[in-house]
Amino acid sequence: MAFFKLTKFRNRWDGIAPYQGVILFFVIMMLANWTWKTFVHDGDYDSYVSLFGYNISWPFIKIQHEVVRVVSLVYVLFDLPFGIRHATEFTFSNGTASDVAWGCTAVKQAFIYTCIIAFSRGPWKHKWWYILAAFPILHTFNVIRISAIGMVLAYHPHYFYLAHKIIFKYSFYFLIFLLWVLWEEVFRLRPLKKNSASQ
């Protein structure tokens, strides 16, 4: 009975072959997000970060300060008046303030992206470099995201919620989706094409 159920499932799975990759993408993304929320202490405004009860705050604090440093350079470049309070909080001339919490380091998004590529189809010898190559892209986008949110807060604070909670939050996951599409459509298929050409 179990064999027939498995065969029926495989037939249905094969019937949606064009959509298998997209389905896997969203399943892996949701599982990675659940894993993070379950095992990592997720207090955005708490300096203490733990994994399985072990303190892993140090690297998050280092990344947090690096993000603040680079975003500060962006504000100087665009001549945006700002101050820094408590090492991680930006203050602006209109009285608003934005705290770069450890949740703003993009480590969670990097973890989700790593899981998606790691469990996607394709050879491991290409996955590892593709995962590492995307980290600077994710970091750069995160700096742009935080810089833009700060500018919105400084000039149009009534749009802060829209920018922070909707536009830039989901655009980050859209970027991850685009990187996955690039993997699926280009880099995953490249070694397969080479192998078929050599045969």
Image: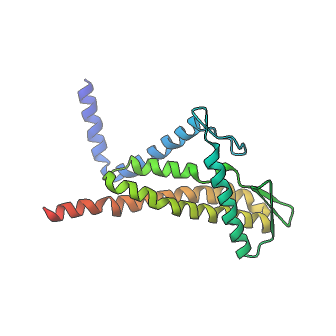
Q: Classify residue 27 as left or right of residue 51.
A: left
Q: Classify residue 51 as left or right of residue 1.
A: right
Say how the picture is coloured. Answer: rainbow
Residue 168, given in percent of the width and then of the height, sits at 62, 59
Q: Nearer the viewer, residue 2 or 173?
A: 173
- Asked if residue 122 can be seen in this view, the reply is no
Q: Please tell me which residue is depicted at 34% across the width and 62% down the height of the picture.
A: 187
How many labels, in total?
Answer: 0
Instruction: Tell me where residue 173 sits by quadrant.
Output: bottom right
- Asked if residue 174 can be seen in this view, the reply is yes
From this view, report whether residue 132 is shown above or below residue 120: below
Residue 21, given in percent of the width and then of the height, sits at 37, 51
Instruction: Tell me where residue 47 sits by quadrant.
Output: top right
Residue 63, given in percent of the width and then of the height, sits at 63, 54
Q: Please tell me which residue is depicted at 30% across the width and 41% down the height of the picture.
A: 12
Q: Please tell me which residue is depicted at 44% across the width and 49% down the height of the picture.
A: 116
Residue 23, given in percent of the width and then of the height, sits at 41, 47
Q: Classify residue 59 as left or right of residue 99.
A: left
Quadrant in the picture for the C terminus: bottom left
